[in-house]
Amino acid sequence: MDVIKIARRAYAISWLSWLELSNWTNPLIFTIYVLIRPLFTLLLYAYIYVAFAISSGYSNPASAFYMVTGISFYNYIGSGIYGVAWVIHEEREHYRLLKYNYLAVPDLMFYLTSRGLIHYLIGLALSLVTLPIGLWLVSYDLSSLQVNLPLILINLILGYLWCTSLGIMVSAISLFSAEWGPLIAESTGGLLFLVGSVLFPAQSLPWWMQPLVNAIPMREWMELTRFALNPQYPIRADFLLQMEVIKTSLYLLCSFVFFKIMDKLVRMKGYLEATTEH
């Protein structure tokens, strides 16, 4: 295996993704544009928390920490899953290039993985920017944070692996749907937000949603992120890390098998060029 050659291909595809995403504009201008939406989302939730704290006369630092970390680090997962799941619709419906990808990069799964990489980096940058701002807005004591850098790095890698695997499975479904690609991508991100303990504990969801909560590693990922920032956060970190590793391994295997089957089927049926003329 030529690691250097693979790395060069991944870099070239990621760089193309960045140029396409930024529409070839000035990097500084695009960075400001990218920051606007997450910052305003954070400001909205922070305002709700501050308004509640003032009106009730009761502030809860633990709840503030839970809310801000959830909103901030969801950017990493939300941006990543959207970046992978959106590619099929964009390449086929907007630019009519999907069939040519098989000539340039025969391994479409590798192409999707590389295209999503830049979105994860952008999401991580957003998380690192919005976290201190959000904690400052809700008057959380930043000195109480004790960052466990090794755990954060491990968790980020695991998050990239399982989230990309989920995005690949969603992309495999999108191969058969030229019209519903955006809805599929947005719905997947919304599902992770709902069941991933982002704003509220996933255990508070109805009982019939708990199998879905347990099937997706989002809850473990988010809780481990909070623990890596504050070791006083009350969870069993070793157990959650083991569960995330197991689920990530299963996602990697399932995504590989599922995508290969769907990829072969879509080529047999000739759906690579299916568009809705939008």
Image (tube, helix red, strand yellow):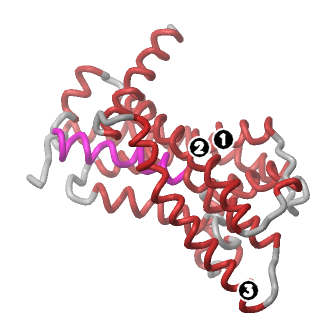
Q: Give yes or no for contact between labels 1 and 2 (Cβ–Cβ under 8 Å).
A: yes
- Toward the viewer: 95 or 137? 137
Instruction: Locate residue 277 relative to residue 58 in the image: left or right.
Output: left
Residue 208 in the figure: left or right of residue 259 = right
Where residue 13 appears, as percent x and y from the top left, is 37, 26
Residue marked by disc 1: 156
Q: CA distance from mark 1 to mark 2?
A: 9 Å
- Identify the residue shown where x is 45% and y is 43%: 31
Tag 1 secondary structure: helix
Start-end of magenta stretch: 76-95
Which amino acid type corresponds to the residue marked 1 in the rendered image?
Answer: Leu
CA distance for labels 3 and 1: 35 Å
> Mark 3 or 1, which is nearer the eye?
3
Q: Is residue 88 magenta?
A: yes
Tags 2 and 3 in contact by the CB under 8 Å rule?
no
In the image, 107 versus 195, the foreground residue is 195
Q: Which residue is mark 2?
A: 124
Query: Of label 1 and label 2, which has the lower sequence position?
Result: 2
Magenta segment, prevailing SS (helix, strand or loop)? helix
- Above or below 6: residue 136: below
The answer to which image quadrant residue 27 occupies is: top left
Label placed on residue 54: 3
Q: How many marks?
A: 3
Say which of marks 1 and 2 sits in front.
2
